[in-house]
Amino acid sequence: HHQFPGKGRIFELVKLFAQIFFTGHVLACAWYWVGLGKDGWVDHHIKASEPWVSRYVSSFYFIYATITTVGYGDIAGLSNPERVLSVGLMVI
């Protein structure tokens, strides 16, 4: 007899995914903000005409490629503040 996991376990799983998403969101916003500087990654990888959703997805993609240690290298820190944030993300 197999029993469906209790509501408490489902809630904990949903809470975990929400925390993971929220952390990624905050870090993606920080990465984008740091990249807005002169000659930052935004200037090199994002067209000025691209909508905010594309900018957000690019930031979110970088964050999860970095913190999961995959780090594809297609988006990288170009300025010192970007590199400092990147190193901090790698330590996490």
Image (cartoon, grey):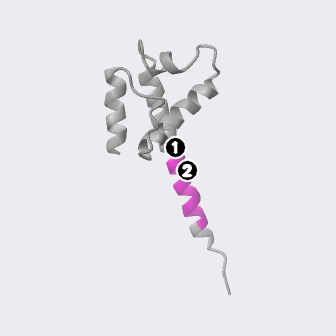
> Given contact means CB atoms under 8 Å apart, are the residues at marks 2 and 1 in contact?
yes
Task: Name the residue that disc number 1 marks.
Answer: 22
21 or 83, nearer to the observer: 83
- Please name the residue shown 37% across and 26% down the image: 82
- The kind of residue on which mark 2 rests is Ala
Q: Secondary structure at mark 2?
A: helix
Tell me if mark 1 has few (under 14), some (14-19) or many (20+) residues whose alpha carbon lies within 10 angstroms of its own. Answer: few
Q: Secondary structure at mark 1?
A: helix
Eyeballing the image, is 3 above or below 79?
below
Q: Main secondary structure of the magenta part?
A: helix
Residue 63, image x, y percentages: 47, 38
- Please name the residue shown 31% across and 29% down the image: 84
Q: Residue 18, which numbered label?
A: 2
Residue 2, image x, y percentages: 67, 83
Tell me if mark 2 has few (under 14), some (14-19) or many (20+) residues whose alpha carbon lies within 10 angstroms of its own. Answer: few
- Please name the residue shown 32% across and 43% down the image: 91
- The kind of residue on which mark 1 rests is Phe
Along the horizontal axis of the image, is 83 left or right of 54?
A: left
Q: Residue 36, which numbered label?
A: none
Along the horizontal axis of the image, is 27 left or right of 17?
A: left
| Segment colored magenta | 10-22
Residue 27, image x, y percentages: 45, 36
- Please name the residue shown 68% across and 87% down the image: 1
